[in-house]
Image: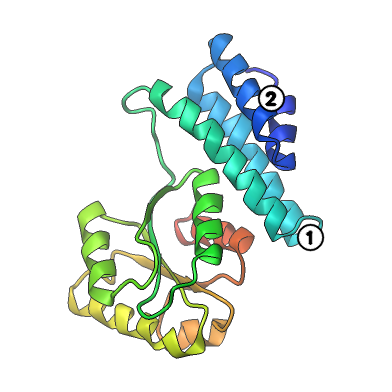
Amino acid sequence: MGNFTALNEAVIKGDVQTAVAETQKALDASQEVRGIIDNGLIAAMDEVGERFSKGQLFVPQMLRSAKTMQACMNLLKPHLQEGETTTKGIVVIGTVKGDLHDIGKNLVSMMLEGAGFEIEDLGVDVAPEEFARKVREVNADILGMSALLSITMPAMAETVKVLRNSGIRDTLKVMIGGAPVTEKYAQEIQADSYAPDAASAVVEAKKLLGIS
């Protein structure tokens, strides 16, 4: 196993140039791609999440780290062998109908991707039927919904209802979040989980799928 300290530090700092150079270096030294992802990128993003939850890092830094991680992933993806793309789970994510906010959702997407989940991001203003269609199409493990306005929160309840009526609610975990959303609301609409921020979304997603 290679030494990924420099790569870890570059991702944590959000230093794209160094991180990409370190990733290339690891590839040139024919390090296993999966190892670079797990020990170089995912380990760094776990640390970023940890620091964020302790208040040592803030959203702009977290976004920088996530973008750095993605730049490294873009370099590694073509080198992944068939069958090497083991994923922790498939997450369909989007901002609910009537809501056009996407910074929080994008951060959650990047953090989940950084933690090894496969992300299907539907963007903003997503209708309940669209969520249900995508969940069925990709056979998702988790549906993540975001709402930044209290007036768009009912779309979350509507989506859960559509999932139930489509017969796919039971095979799926539903996680919700966004500024006005609360744990209590999650319980009211019978969502499986509520995450107040991107770092806790990763923790919750792992918990939902029984991954340590």
| Residue 153 at least partly seen | no
Q: How is the image coloured?
A: rainbow
Q: Nearer the viewer, residue 36 or 24?
A: 24
Quadrant location of residue 122?
A: bottom left
Residue 71 at x, y percent in the picture: 54, 35
Marks counted in the figure total 2
As shown in the figure, which amino acid type bears the numbered disc 2? Answer: Phe
Residue drawn 67% across and 39% down?
A: 44
Q: Seen from this angle, which residue lies furthest right?
A: 56
Numbered label attached to residue 4? 2
Does residue 182 sit above or below 193 in this rendering?
Answer: below
Please give left or right for residue 81 compared with residue 133 in the image: right
Tag 2 secondary structure: loop
Quadrant containing the N terminus in the rendered view: top right
Quadrant location of residue 43?
A: top right
Circle 1 packing at 10 Å, graded few (<14), some (14-19), many (20+), is: few
Residue drawn 38% across and 28% down?
A: 84
Numbered label attached to residue 131? none
Does residue 84 sit above or below 24 in this rendering?
Answer: below
Quadrant location of residue 27?
A: top right
Q: Seen from this angle, which residue lies furthest left?
A: 166
Circle 2 packing at 10 Å, graded few (<14), some (14-19), many (20+), is: some
As shown in the figure, which amino acid type bears the numbered disc 1? Answer: Lys
Residue drawn 47% across and 32% down?
A: 74
Q: Nearer the viewer, residue 189 or 126?
A: 126
Tag 1 secondary structure: loop
Which of the two discs, 1 and 2, labels the residue nearer the N terminus? 2
Q: CA distance from mark 1 to mark 2?
A: 24 Å
Identify the residue position indicated by label 1 in the image: 54
| Residue 182 at least partly seen | yes
Residue drawn 49% across and 22% down?
A: 33
Residue 182 at x, y percent in the picture: 56, 83
